Image: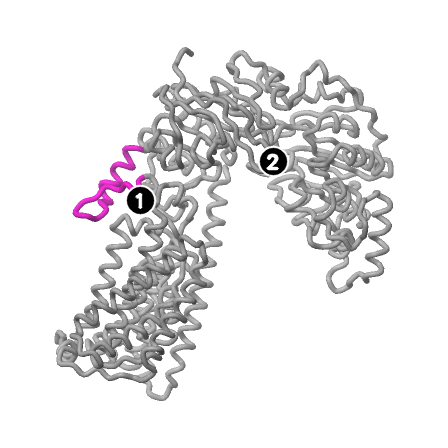
Amino acid sequence: MSSRLLPFYATLAIFVLAYGVCVFQFPNMLSTRVAGNLLTDNAFLGIVAVGMTFVILSGGIDLSVGAVIGFTTVLIAVLISWYGIHPLAAFAIALAISTAFGAAMGVVIHYLDVPAFIVTLAGMFLARGMAFVITTDSIPIRHEFYTTLQGLYLRLPGGGRFTLIGGLMVLVFAFGIALAHFTRFGSYVYALGGNKTSAELMGVPVARTTIGIYALSGFLSGLAGVVFSLYTSAGYSLSAVGVELDTIAAVVIGGTLLTGGVGLVAGTFMGVIIQGLIQTYIVFDGTLSSWWTKIVVGLLLFAFIALQRLLVVLSDRKRLLRNTPT
Amino acid sequence: MSNPDLLTARDIRKSFVGFKALDSVDFSVRAGEIHALLGENGAGKSTLIKVLTGVLRADSGTFELNGDPITVRDTLHAQQLGIGTVYQEVNLLPNLTVAENLYIGRQPKRFGLVDTRAMHKMARALLADYDIDIDVGAQLSSFSVAVQQLVAIARAVDMSGSVLILDEPTASLDRHEVELLFGVLRKLRDRGLGIVFITHFLDQVYAISDRITVLRNGRLVGTRETASLPRVELVSMMLGRTLAAATEHGRRDAPPHSSRRIAFHDFGRDRSIAPFDMTIHAGEVVGVAGLLGSGRTETARLMFGIDLADCGTIGIDGKPVKIASPRDAVRLGFGLCPEDRKADGIIGDLSVRENIALALQARRGWLRRMSTSDQTELANRFVKALDIRTTDIEKPVKLLSGGNQQKVILARWLATSPRFLILDEPTRGIDVGAHAEIIELINKLCDEGLALLVISSELEEIVAYSTRVRTLRDRAHVGELTGAEISTGSIMQAIAADPGGAK
């Protein structure tokens, strides 16, 4: 395939290399336990990153995802603990609200022609503010159904646990890959990221696609909120602060061009898992501060942006050479 | 050519705030013809195309397709009616595959998902009609501009299929690619498509078109059969001058050759301007004449180092020099007053004083700032010398009239005491009085020993100040007129000359 997918291959290579180094130092890291935990611990991040991948592929950005996760956990906790609503009903309500919230941002972005950065920044404050208005306390969720869900897992050979939320993340990624590469909607998303004016002239339904993209991101943020509440058994208005930035980092490390149009959903999976791997390494090491995760992620992010820029420059130069008749 | 009219537009009017872009224009395309649409800048070509394709709405006028009256609502509706357009900037999506570009929005589906294999098969079959055999699953950006252009045409024909409008499709193609494109166009014509073709290259017009429509200043000049329209007449239609009236002669003789000269040898750039030789002596004004798109501005950009030459050498007073950027050019004493004054020349919000001091300051470097009193002294000197009408040298330049803005740019370069000044359309958009003053100024600068290269589409003007005239056609320097040879008539002949007939 083309050189523009090189960042994806680079991510893959870095993952294999990093995992190799980890295993060399701590042989225990090569186990289904670690693999299962990687999926479980990063489930919410992965789910929200799929939505972010679509947003970034279309040339946009969604800064509201972390706040929507926080809002969703609080809403679910309040609905279950204060109003006694069944968790499934609470999930449905939360997902409906988060999807509508995303769609509304898409409407504003398209029809008022406001940069996504500004609209979703406003959305971020709005969602976080709403969470605080509901309650500033951390609300524990105690419900049989929750205990049941949390107890669901497949035992992997070697003692690892493939949990429900880990599985859900894998499912969301499979869905995202199919949506991106095997549907018209997917091609519209790439088209928007490539050149919005051309896409419009070629008959791409820009309004419908833009709203769909942000609605999808909203829905997946809500789903990530559900997963987060399952993961922590609580709802707290300060949860998932800054997750939007981790998500963007995962998408970019996964090889998606921040300017849109180029990238793979599968790349984002690698981006998420690499972040998880760094954290696991730090846990295994035991002496390093967990803030080292941020430092390594920062360095990786910088390296990837530099790599993408370099590839763009190189391919431009190559095209120039090829177009010159000999 | 008794084919019926396929698409007819009658009495089309379109105006933008106080300016008539199209004034009662009639236009028609027949089935099975290639119709060239010609005109200089601001003639209304692109407005007409936009009206035909639904990008803009006409203020009044009627459209008929196959005899039925139609109203084009928007671009999508135009496509559905069968009017397909390929714009100069290939408006496809370089980050998608060729097949996706051809079928986006109408991909074949199987079980609700896009059937990529079927889509690739369809794409290969479609492109086979155009003798293109490429990997349709590869990214569009991995192919040359010519292939992208053909893909855009294939898409437009496949989606629309009765009228194809091509807006300067050959602007970025080389000779071989143009031939390839023309082969495809002829095939489509024989299939019965009506093709509208916009270009600035006269040779191409004669190579491929059946009829020609010329617009000028938003009005229809005429529609003629290509075979019975001599080149000179076409040029006079485009420029709006008749040969009979065009007889005034130049007043200037070339000065004696001095040793102070700038020599460009075999200077050129691929896809921009064919290599040319030119030596300009001090005290000489070389006029550059040619139609829009003939390579006039490209020549200026190349000389000033904005675009880099692929080949050739420059010598100043016999010594070889290198120009790799406009900074180098300025250091060597070159100056350029660009065509688009507002975008590339003046800095509207800065004062007259600051605009005049700009080039000199740039040459001194940012460490050695010119003091305000130096700047004021400089500005006052030039305001007086060039008679720049401004109430105050602290006035923002954007508040000045066009002619005075032009003088400010001239002053900016003159402040650097240049040896060579390039003026690209120095009198565009300037009122008649200021027009005469600029011409006088050019003559005066020339007498003072400056070497000048002046590009203009006003032939009378070129005749009035040039000691020599370079004529350009189809991105090449094709001739030079000196002394008594210079007249508007001879320039027009040179621009229109048929390269085949001249040999």
Is B262 left, or right, of B95 in this rendering? right
According to the picture, the residue beneath numbered tag 2 turns out to be B18
Q: What amino acid is at disc 2?
A: Gly
The number of callouts visible is: 2
Span shown in magenta:
B103-126
Answer whether residue B43 is visible to the viewer in this image: yes
Q: Which mark is residue A179?
A: none
Chain label for disc 2:
B
List the residue tagged with mark 1: B137
Percent across and percent down for residue B470 are 70, 28
User: Is B119 in the magenta?
Assistant: yes
Q: Secondary structure at mark 2?
A: loop
The structure residue drawn at horizontal position 31% and vertical position 31%, both measured from the top left corner, is: B128
Please give the name of the residue rendered at 53% of the width and 31% of the height, measured from the top-left corner: B14
User: Compared with residue A309, is residue A142 higher up or lower down, i.e. above or below?
Assistant: below
Q: Considering the numbered disc 1 on the image, is that residue within a helix, a strand or a loop?
A: loop
**Eye-nearest disc, 1 or 2:** 2
Question: Does the magenta-highlighted stretch encompass residue A182?
Answer: no
Q: Nearer the viewer, residue A148 or B417?
A: A148
Residue B417 screen position, x and y as percent: 82, 47
Q: Chain under label 1?
A: B
Mark 1 Cα-neighbour bin, 10 Å: few <14, some 14–19, many ≥20: some
- Quadrant including the C terminus of chain B: top right
Identity of the amino acid at label 1? Gly
Quadrant of the rendered image containing residue A85: bottom left
Q: Quadrant of the N terminus of chain B?
A: top left
Q: Earlier in the sequence, mark 1 or mark 2?
A: 2
Say which quarter of the image contains residue B79.
top left
Residue B503 in view of the camera: no
